[in-house]
Image: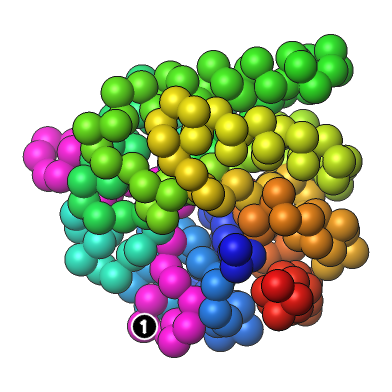
Amino acid sequence: MKKLIVANWKLNPLRETDAIRLARVSDRDHTVICPPFVFLESVGKTLRRAKLGAQDAFWKESGPYTGEASPVQLKRLGVSYALIGHSSRRTELRETDAMINKKIRAALRAGLKVILCVGEPWNVRRKGLPAAKSFVRTQLQKDLAGIRTAKPTARNLIVAYEPIWAIGTGRADAPHDTIEISKFIKNLLAARYSLRAAKVLYGGSMTSRNAKSFVQYKEIDGALVGGASLKAEEIRTIISIATQQNGNR
Ligand code: PGA
């Protein structure tokens, strides 16, 4: 399976010219660039090889919803992927599993590929991997409840495992723990949703220095990269490390 690198720029950069410059250096195959909404159009016009991703998508197509962006509008703008349920939205904006569930359905209906973000806080992980697995299982069950009718397939539903304590902290997960959780997620998706061979990405303080220690394993299908995706040299190196793995199989 080809490795996928997803660049999540979050609320960066401030200027469109910087966004376009960053898009150019990240424009490679098997890469998804998720700029802030305001730069989706200009970054989309810049990309030739990478796909365009949104950092969120609302659950309604249109209507009286101030400040939201609809999955249908995003699709028409050239967006192919949507991050749903990122931990910063779950925590800072109190986004619930019920809201995330509605967003996933609407995004799939609109023809977007969903990158569903899950992951446990430190107070769970410190109790060990079984506790983390059970936390992630509950998130997946709630987020994907009744989702069969929205026809997810292994092609349009990707899971990003991002332990919250690893995001933006410089303290990445141990790859052997990520492998175990990734296998757990893949088994769950296959058993409960008949989703075989769904991609599971790792996210949380990935850099050019630790990228290989994750993406070299077949259980980890790529990465969701935040901070390092804003630095040209870093993201270029991470993408080329992932691409080398593609060449190896
Ligand atoms: P980070 O962010 O790479 O800066 O830890 C990852 C993410 O939040 O998607």
Residue 190 or residue 240, whichever sits in front = 190
Give the number of marks.
Answer: 1
Quarter of the figure with the C terminus:
bottom right
One can see residue 42 in this view? yes
Residue 228 or residue 195, whichever sits in front = 195
Q: Is residue 180 placed above or below 208 in the rendered structure?
A: above
Quarter of the figure with the N terminus:
bottom right
The range drawn in magenta is 44-71
The location of residue 32, given as percent across then percent down, is 51, 67
Q: Give the side of residue 119 with respect to residue 213, left or right.
A: left
Instruction: Respond yes or no on whether mark 1 lies under 8 Å from ligand 1.
Output: no
Kindly identify the residue that appears in the image at 43 percent across and 76 percent down. 43
User: Is 46 contained in the magenta span?
Assistant: yes
The location of residue 105, given as percent across then percent down, is 27, 37
The answer to which quarter of the image holds residue 245 is bottom right
Kindly identify the residue that appears in the image at 87 percent across and 57 percent down. 213
Magenta: main secondary structure equals loop
Identify the amino acid type marked 1.
Lys
Q: Residues within 10 Å of mark 1 (few under 14, many from 20)?
A: few
The location of residue 52, given as percent across then percent down, is 42, 68
Residue 108 or residue 11, whichever sits in front = 108
One can see residue 89 in this view? no
Q: Which residue is mark 1?
A: 45
User: Is 56 contained in the magenta span?
Assistant: yes
Q: Is residue 159 placed above or below 30 in the rendered structure?
A: above
